[in-house]
Amino acid sequence: MSKNIFEPYSTEKRLQAMKFLDKSITNGKPNYLKVAKETGITKPTLKRWWTKHQLERQKELKIRLEEAIASILERIEKLAQETNNLKELAPVVKMLSELFQQFDEENGDINAWG
C-alpha cells in the first residue's frame, strides 16, 4: 500500500499564505507567483484559497450590511410612530440611502444578491 504524497496544509500554513497574498496585492490582485515561491504552495492552490477567502469576506459583509439596514429600518419605524414631524426621519433615511449608494459603488448592484 502506498503512502499518500499529498498531505493537507495546516490551518496555520493557510492563514500565513492568506496574509502573504493580502500583503502582495498590486492593482487589486495578489502576486500568486511570489507567494508560491515564498510558501512552497502551488499557484492553483493559492488561487483557490484566495477565491474562497474573498467569497467568505463578501458573505460577512452582506450579513453586516443586512443587520445595519434592519437596524436603520427599525429606527425609522420607531421614529415614525413617535413623531408627526417627518423632518426628524430625514437624517436616518439619508443615512440608509448613502449606505446603499456606497455599497453599490464598491460591490456592484445590490439587487444581484439573490
Image (cartoon, grey):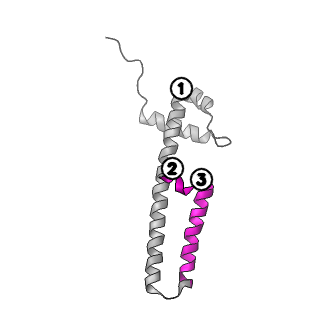
Residue 1 in which image quadrant: top left
Query: In the rendered structure, are the residues bearing label 3 and label 1 in contact, judged by CB atoms less than 8 Å apart?
Result: no
Residue type beneath disc 2? Gln
Residue type beneath disc 1? Thr
Specify whether residue 10 is painted magenta: no
Residue type beneath disc 3? Gly
CA gap between label 1 and label 2 equals 25 Å
Image-based side of 19 in relation to 11, left or right: right
Image-based side of 69 in relation to 2, left or right: right
In this figure, which residue is indicated by the disc labeled 3? 108
CA gap between label 3 and label 1 equals 31 Å
Which tag, 3 or 1, sits closer to the chain's start?
A: 1
Image-based side of 35 in relation to 81, left or right: right
* Outermost residue, left side: 1
Mark linked to residue 58: 2
Q: Nearer the viewer, residue 47 or 40?
A: 47
When the figure is inspected, residue 6 is found, relative to residue 105, above or below; the finding is above
When the figure is inspected, residue 74 is found, relative to residue 109, above or below; the finding is below
Q: Which span of residues is magenta-colored? A: 87-114
* Outermost residue, top side: 1
Specify whether residue 91 is painted magenta: yes
Q: Residues within 10 Å of mark 1 (few under 14, many from 20)?
A: few
**Discs 3/1, front:** 3
Residue 4 in the image: x percent, y percent?
Answer: 38, 18
Q: How crowded is mark 2: few (under 14 residues within 10 Å), some or many (20 or more)?
A: few
**Discs 2/3, front:** 3
Image point (55%, 69%), residue name: 96
Name the chief secondary structure element in magenta. helix
